[in-house]
Image (cartoon, rainbow, N blue to C red):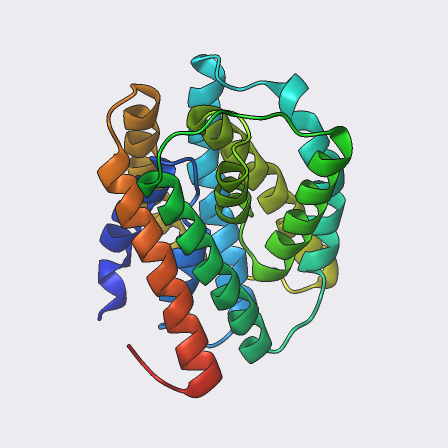
């Protein structure tokens, strides 16, 4: 596959992921790993693209009054500093992709459950539980080089915390702040690097795709089909990373 096709591919990834409140960082990482050997460049590029996509989604959620800072803020208190610390860890490329892949397999499975099971009554979380979820997933997001919403959202849906639109709004902003914290962590650690000309093209692609996906999501279109496709894509990306970097098997 030629690198010239990346903007087109990333447009559709941003469309799928943003429709359910995500940035697409996991798939950006997986695809970029096919073209680059320096995985700090891969992590940096994925975080930049994440920020572009979820900035649009967060704006849309705030505009449609789905975003509720009073309800969300405990998740960020613990996630932001731990995302910063996680981004500073220096992992081998193999360990990095195995951690990311394993996490994505679980996230894809949980996300698929969200769309196939019957609707259940929502429940509230204690302050301590929000801190715990936020901190753990924030650290994981910093280590893996993605915003963490793709881990947080399936877990919250599995535990029936609030409705899906509220969770999508939280996931969008969660990805935004943790991606920024991750970039700062990479910069401080001296591992922030990216290809300016390529990133410029990819930013345009994901902004267009992310804008369209966020628009469809906030207009209450029935996105069940896109959600299932996204869940399958997340699971496949995770499985591919584990098989490739753990066993040398390509699928």
User: In front here: 145 or 184?
Assistant: 145
Q: Is residue 128 above or below residue 47?
A: above
Pinpoint residue 196: horizontal percent, then vertical percent.
45, 55
Pinpoint residue 194: horizontal percent, then vertical percent.
50, 60
- Residue at (36, 43) in percent of width and height: 17
Task: Identify the image quadrant of residue 33.
Answer: bottom left
User: In front here: 54 or 227?
Assistant: 227
- Residue at (29, 36) in percent of width and height: 208
- Residue at (44, 86) in percent of width and height: 247
**On-image quarter of the N terminus:** bottom left
Q: Is residue 31 above or below residue 249?
A: above
Residue furthest to the bottom in view is 248
**On-image quarter of the C terminus:** bottom left
46 lies left or right of 112: right
| Count of numbered circles on the image | 0
Pinpoint residue 188: horizontal percent, then vertical percent.
74, 56
User: In front here: 193 or 82?
Assistant: 82
- Residue at (52, 36) in percent of width and height: 171
Q: Is residue 204 visible?
A: no
Q: Is residue 100 visible?
A: yes
178 lies left or right of 33: right
Task: Identify the image quadrant of residue 189.
Answer: bottom right
132 lies left or right of 11: right
Task: Identify the image quadrant of residue 90.
Answer: bottom right
Q: Is residue 60 above or below residue 250?
A: above
């Amino acid at each position: 596959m030629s690198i010239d096709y990346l903007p087109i591919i990333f447009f559709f990834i941003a469309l799928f992921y943003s429709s359910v409140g995500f940035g697409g960082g996991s798939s950006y990482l997986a695809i970029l790993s096919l073209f680059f050997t320096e995985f700090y460049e891969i992590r940096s590029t994925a975080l930049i693209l994440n920020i572009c996509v979820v900035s649009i989604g967060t704006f849309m959620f705030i505009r449609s009054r789905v975003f509720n800072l009073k309800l969300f803020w405990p998740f960020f208190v613990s996630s932001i500093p731990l995302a910063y610390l996680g981004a500073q860890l220096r992992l081998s490329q193999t360990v990095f992709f195995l951690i990311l892949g394993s996490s994505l397999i679980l996230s894809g499975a949980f996300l698929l459950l969200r769309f196939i099971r019957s609707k259940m009554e929502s429940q509230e979380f204690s302050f301590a539980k929000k801190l715990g979820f936020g901190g753990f997933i924030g650290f994981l997001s910093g280590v893996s080089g993605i915003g963490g919403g793709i881990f947080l959202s399936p877990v919250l849906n599995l535990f029936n915390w609030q409705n899906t639109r509220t969770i999508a709004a939280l996931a969008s902003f969660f990805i935004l702040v943790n991606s920024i914290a991750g970039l700062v962590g990479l910069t401080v650690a001296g591992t922030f690097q990216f290809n300016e000309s390529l990133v410029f093209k990819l930013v345009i692609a994901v902004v267009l795709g992310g804008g369209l996906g966020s628009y469809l999501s906030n207009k209450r279109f029935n996105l069940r089909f896109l959600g299932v496709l996204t869940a399958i894509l997340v699971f496949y990306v995770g499985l591919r990373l584990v098989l490739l970097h753990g066993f040398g098997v390509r699928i």
